[in-house]
Image (cartoon, helix red, strand yellow):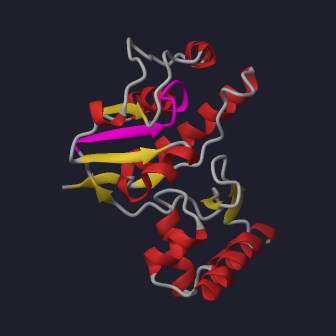
Amino acid sequence: MAQVERRAALHAALSDPGRLAVVELLSRGDASPSELAAELAMPSNLLAHHVNVLVEHGLLERTRSEGDRRRTYLRLLPSDLGPFADPLPRPRRVLFICTANSARSHLAVALWRRTSTIPATSAGTHPAASLAAGAIAAASRHKLQLGDEHPRRIDEVRQADDLVITVCDRAHEEIGADADAHWSIPDPVPAGDVSAFDDAITELERRVVDLAPRLVLN
């Protein structure tokens, strides 16, 4: 009965069209409250109310930006109701972007290629000279193929019809609306330890597995 009551509470939280709209938008990626308010044309006080209800029910969490520390991002959490999986248009290619293009974006591409037949590549807003050693080691532990890729600038890589996903708060805040979705993944490079890179891969894989099957609309 406890599980049934939990599911009933979640259904009740989502019975409001405004809250359901917030959840459906966040199922595509993370967003700041101001981004949500603009996208949904919703007054900030009403959005704050809906977000508080969803956080209280364990459907959303707030995270602090690694770039602009004044900014928070809202993230949809896995729930007993399962994924919110409305179909999305199938792109010709997925482009993952972070700042240095030395870790998260390359790991995202490797995970994507293991999951989907849609091509994927990566780039950075300020590319490093080489891939991070921790990313290479993490890829080896998780049996991911990084290939011969190296850090590249966005303008070297981006095509007009790419589905652009930022996996770095700084990159998202730099390119803004040029990104189609944002995944707020903590940078594992400063910590540099095994757990930081493994945590990044775990979260990236969850996002990839959620999104890839949804890209089916022609």
Residue 2 vs residue 108: left or right? right
Q: What stretch is highlighted in magenta?
A: 92-104
Q: In which quarter of the image is residue 51?
A: bottom right
Q: Quadrant of residue 55?
A: bottom right
Tell which residue pokes out farthest to the right in this image: 2
Q: Percent x, y for residue 30? A: 55, 58
For the point 71% across and 28% down, the residue is 190
Q: Percent x, y for residue 70? A: 70, 60
For the point 60% across and 65% down, the residue is 81
Compared to residue 35, the image places residue 144 above or below, namely above
The answer to whether residue 77 is magenta is: no
Q: Percent x, y for residue 203? A: 61, 40
For the point 58% across and 65% down, the residue is 32
Q: Percent x, y for residue 49? A: 68, 84
Quadrant for the N terminus in the image = bottom right
Q: In which quarter of the image is residue 71?
A: bottom right
